[in-house]
Image: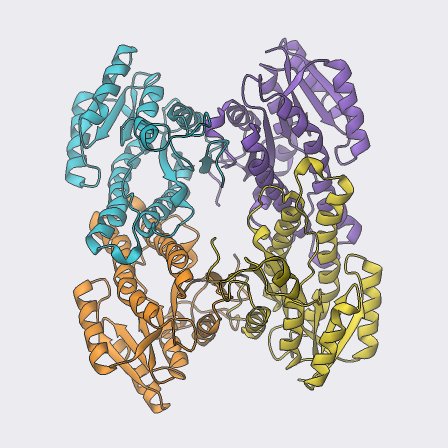
Chain colours: A cyan, B orange, C yellow, D purple
């Protein structure tokens, strides 16, 4: 399966890292992040484990920056086809009373969330579609969603608006590209992910009450290997202890 | 009740006109539209019926334009408080295969939908909140939604993304401003509205299979007069004949 | 409009009473309850206000009992057609850890909830359909739902199962009988209703934080008068202060 | 892992068979069906593949019948704990105009659907809970849902009512038993499953347009092996070609 690769937008210490490691067992993995610190460790760990990894600095919300990234991919991995794209960009988080929001803050959260996803899917969907014929598993686009994708709480107007929008985009793309053989999956992560950052600011005595990134990555991989007769469009993931 | 008024963003021949006429039975009505042709007839009809109406050219997606409109309102209707705001802006409609969409088209549909609603609610929510104490009915923000607010079909990625986002914004605002006494309602209009335009391009022999704008306006009025112990946050409206 | 009547299953001190009083302004009202105490006051109050009211002891979960009730209606109100039916039966409430539930308790909550609604709609839908041609407003079936209709909390397995089922029945009936001109509406009451009983066991200093039954009744009446081009299938009602 | 077993209610040629074969790679599998023909082939195939299988004739809607089945399990597999329970009972399907339904038909579809799931979960949840401490994966209850679990179409009143109810039961049980370590998952199968029966009556030229039971079984297994920090409560499965 050397002729296929995976791309992950939003590498970082949680889901991005875990997904990169998981998919690197089968495919070379390209990671996009705004800062090299976000992927350097992951690239190193994948290579140490015998896998292939490439990190590229890119801002997916900026279409020119993203185009340059795909040019680099084309040069570094010539003739490889795209088997899976994971959209894990952690953009747009904002909690604020609505009337304290400024228009530019709203646009930076809401508008950019949409633009970034638009740019990424415009680039990856044609590539995923090209891989339909011979990919070992149906080419897959997996998007990391959040509680705010399905529930808009007070103080989260901008953030929820962006997340609801991404859910809509996924639904629409599933209906358009599913019949063409591309698997579009949206995963609602309903709980805190266990990362160095979340360890610091949310202490709890309940073991496993934060979501293990490796577990998310295993589910992402499972989504990827679903055959086209049995695609999942949406699913939730939450800790056993989560009230919902 | 002469000391309160209603504002309607998105005056036009369908829901906007009907809502303006309905609310003008009780309040002076301000209408915002990008072109004066959209409200001139309505202003005339309201005045002929003995009501007060004011049309203002404004682009709600442009915050400076909207600010000027509210300055005009302040001068024309001094000392009036805002009892109801109807957001009926018909923005962002776009049906196109996803990969044919250009980024600027996407932003014009999706981003502008969010920005326009953001601008309008930033201006009206403080005014609605000021009216809580003495408004005859709880001050109300009513938003016209669409089928695409809850279902993202193939070819409607940008449009649905904007509509899902507006639904999220309404939900979040309901949770934030409801406890402050402002009624936030989102109405999913699931069907074709009977307007001169829709008469032309969708002919049908089934009477009443297009939604009568007056009926929507009656429901909007009903939402406005709900007391605060019994607010409706979301409801659908569709013709009896609609498959859903 | 003397030739039409309304029937309300589940008369009682809250929504049932308020709906009876509201609809009695236009129609004679028949009330069904298991005990005469539930409707005696309402009948008296309606008559004192100049309306027509008839209370009948019936158990809607028992089809024979319900048939007898409709026989009585036929004799007492000959030649009247059914313009509106309100299903407000407060059945099946049960909060208990799942493993403490006995099968007969489950059946008494869940099964009976379904059976009662089935019996009532089997009797009323043919009558509502007969009234389509000349009823002043589209004949309407309104069902009182609850938070548990859309969210199944821990400890509410049996109750939620019944409420979800009633929501399904309403959706299916809307799709089947809507095109025949009968309006099927389901109202999710998400909050505590202000009744003598709830006053006693839930005290609160927040005015209007319990739903006023009269407000529910006004919304039910609004649903009834919606023309067939603009039916609402589902809506929520909750106090401004409710967290949701 | 010889000290744990799986039980499957609703063995048969589609999902039941595939789940049994998949879970038998790790656990002895007990199958319940009303007729031995439903599981005989599966038992044979599992044994030929080196696994352990036991078929028991039982009607899960009948609590006495189900109790006898669990007595047999206790004798045949002493000291084994229950690691997974799959509820795949294909009950209650009924398509009929609502007014042609008889009460007993409704009860046979709707009421029995609830009773059967109630009986099964009353028996299995205590056993799953006992296995929390040492089960190799969190003890899991997986329920096979259907399109009718989330959408109630015309003509499917009884069937949808039962399916909505099962979804509610799963949601409530997830909230009650999740925090106790038991994984409760509900899978909405939105499409036709490829079985000998469906091959006969629905011919199509589109390959993979019917769901392969093996693919469902792989997803069920994936749900089972999710660690407790990352439980999925609900997901859909549908063919790439399905309009939804």
Count of residue discs:
0
Taking the spot 74% from the left edge, 74% from the top edge, the residue there is C30
Q: Position of residue C192 (x, y in %)?
A: 57, 59
Q: Is residue D200 among what the camera can see?
A: yes
> Relative to residue D107, is residue D26 drawn left or right?
left
Quadrant for the N terminus of chain A, please.
top left
Q: Position of residue B177 (x, y in %)?
A: 38, 61
Q: Position of residue B207 (x, y in %)?
A: 52, 73
Quarter occupied by residue A22:
top left
Quarter occupied by residue A122:
top left
Q: Does C141 sit above or below residue A217?
A: below
> Relative to residue D215, is residue C42 drawn left or right?
right
Pick the residue in front: B73 or B79: B79
Pick the residue in front: B193 or A113: A113
Taking the spot 76% from the left edge, 48% from the top edge, the residue there is C108
Quarter occupied by residue C131:
bottom right
Q: Position of residue B153 (x, y in %)?
A: 41, 50
Q: Does B164 sit above or below residue D64?
A: below
Pick the residue in front: A81 or D93: D93
Q: Does A33 sit above or below residue B164?
A: above
Taking the spot 43% from the left edge, 75% from the top edge, the residue there is B137
Q: Is residue A227 among what the camera can see?
A: no
Taking the spot 71% from the left edge, 75% from the top edge, the residue there is C42
């Amino acid at each position: 399966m050397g002729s296929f690769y995976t791309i992950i937008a939003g590498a970082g210490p949680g889901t991005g890292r875990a997904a990169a490691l998981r998919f690197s067992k089968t495919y070379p993995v390209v990671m996009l992040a705004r800062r090299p610190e976000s992927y350097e460790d992951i690239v190193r760990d994948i290579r140490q484990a015998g896998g292939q990894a490439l990190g590229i600095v890119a801002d997916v919300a900026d279409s020119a920056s993203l185009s340059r990234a795909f040019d680099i991919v084309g040069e570094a991995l010539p003739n490889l086809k795209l088997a899976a794209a994971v959209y894990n960009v952690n953009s747009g988080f904002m909690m604020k009373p609505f009337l304290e929001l400024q228009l530019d803050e709203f646009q930076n959260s809401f508008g950019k969330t949409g633009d970034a996803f638009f740019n990424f899917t415009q680039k990856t969907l044609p590539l995923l579609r090209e891989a339909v014929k011979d990919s070992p598993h149906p080419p897959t686009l997996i998007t990391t969603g959040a509680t705010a994708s399905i529930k808009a709480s007070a103080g989260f107007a901008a953030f929820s608006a962006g997340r609801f929008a991404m859910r809509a985009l996924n639904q629409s793309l599933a209906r358009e590209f599913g019949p063409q053989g591309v698997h579009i999956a949206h995963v609602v992560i309903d709980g805190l992910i266990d990362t160095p950052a979340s360890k610091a600011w949310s202490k709890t005595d309940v073991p496993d009450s934060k979501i293990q990134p490796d577990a998310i990555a295993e589910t992402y991989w499972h989504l990827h290997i679903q055959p086209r007769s049995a695609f999942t469009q949406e699913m939730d993931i939450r800790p056993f202890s989560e009230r919902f």
